[in-house]
């Protein structure tokens, strides 16, 4: 029995990848799950204030995993990762000629930069500093290890007291591979990155928010048995 649905935000709950408009139809359908006692949580690289506000206004009750797993909220706020060293941020920004994400003013542990492309030099530098580095396709993210959506998702599931097999995770980008490691049913929207699709139990036919509607319909109609490739 499904008790918790974890959904990424950008590219999943939006109208399309690269578009920052939340799909109103997707929200409407996710609220149907809430009405039936299935909690919905937001899991994203976005900052905590952004996700907490969306969570409340969209009518969800499952909590949030913000900053790529570093900050968790379910009834209380929990910081899972070590706060970032501002000197390291400045060094990273200057060394690789990057621009700050506008959300960096509101972040504690995981910080975002553009352009979102990762180089081998960046990976080597991050390893030397003990940093997690990843790209959502929208921004480049760094945080002290351990980090990644899996650490926050693991904590959120623990707070809910549910089993892994009772949890669904849906996403579109490579950062969602971390979330997939902690959930029972892994779902990729139709326009997800190919590497994510390879790890998914279910690949939806429709893109982004339309795919979320498709998934909710499957849940409500009891059609989640087996792989749906």
Image (cartoon, rainbow, N blue to C red):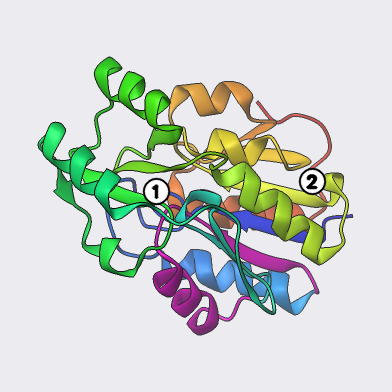
The picture places residue 8, in percent across and down from the top left corner, at 51, 52
The picture places residue 77, in percent across and down from the top left corner, at 61, 73
In the drawing, does residue 7 fall left or right of residue 219?
left
**Residue that badge 2 annotates:** 223
At x 83%, y 56%, the residue is: 2
At x 67%, y 38%, the residue is: 186
Give the vertical position of 97 relative to 219 (above or below).
above
Give the vertical position of 114 relative to 104 (above or below).
above
Q: Nearer the viewer, residue 103 or 212?
A: 103
Q: Residues within 10 Å of mark 2 (few under 14, many from 20)?
A: few
The picture places residue 69, in percent across and down from the top left corner, at 55, 51
In the drawing, does residue 12 fall left or right of residue 60?
left
Q: Quadrant of the N terminus?
A: bottom right
Q: Nearer the viewer, residue 22 or 131?
A: 131
At x 72%, y 49%, the residue is: 154
Range of magenta residues: 37-60
Q: Nearer the viewer, residue 61 or 226?
A: 61
Examine the rendering and report whether any part of residue 19 can be seen: yes
Residue 13 colored in magenta in the image = no
**Residue that badge 1 annotates:** 11
In the drawing, does residue 131 fall left or right of residue 153?
left
Q: Residues within 10 Å of mark 1 (few under 14, many from 20)?
A: many
């Amino acid at each position: 029995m499904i008790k918790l649905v974890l959904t990424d935000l950008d590219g999943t709950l939006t109208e399309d990848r690269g578009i920052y408009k939340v799909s109103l139809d997707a929200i409407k359908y996710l609220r149907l799950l809430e009405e039936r006692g299935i909690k919905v949580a937001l899991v994203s690289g976005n900052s905590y204030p952004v996700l907490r506000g969306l969570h409340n206004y969209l009518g969800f009750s499952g909590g949030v995993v913000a900053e790529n797993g570093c900050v968790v909220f379910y009834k209380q706020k929990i910081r899972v990762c070590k706060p970032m060293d501002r000197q390291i941020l400045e060094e990273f920004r200057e060394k690789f000629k990057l621009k700050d994400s506008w959300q960096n003013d509101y972040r504690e542990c995981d910080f975002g930069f553009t352009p979102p492309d990762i180089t081998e030099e960046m990976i080597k530098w991050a390893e030397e500093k003990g940093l997690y580095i990843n790209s959502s396709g929208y921004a480049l993210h760094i945080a002290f290890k351990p980090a990644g959506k899996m650490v926050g998702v693991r904590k959120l599931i623990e707070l809910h007291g549910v089993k892994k097999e009772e949890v669904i995770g849906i996403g579109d980008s490579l950062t969602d591979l971390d979330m997939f490691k902690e959930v029972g049913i892994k779902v990729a929207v139709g326009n997800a990155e190919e590497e994510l699709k390879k790890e998914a139990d279910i690949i939806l036919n429709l893109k982004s928010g339309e795919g979320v509607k498709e998934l909710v319909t499957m849940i409500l109609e009891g059609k989640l048995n087996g792989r749906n490739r």
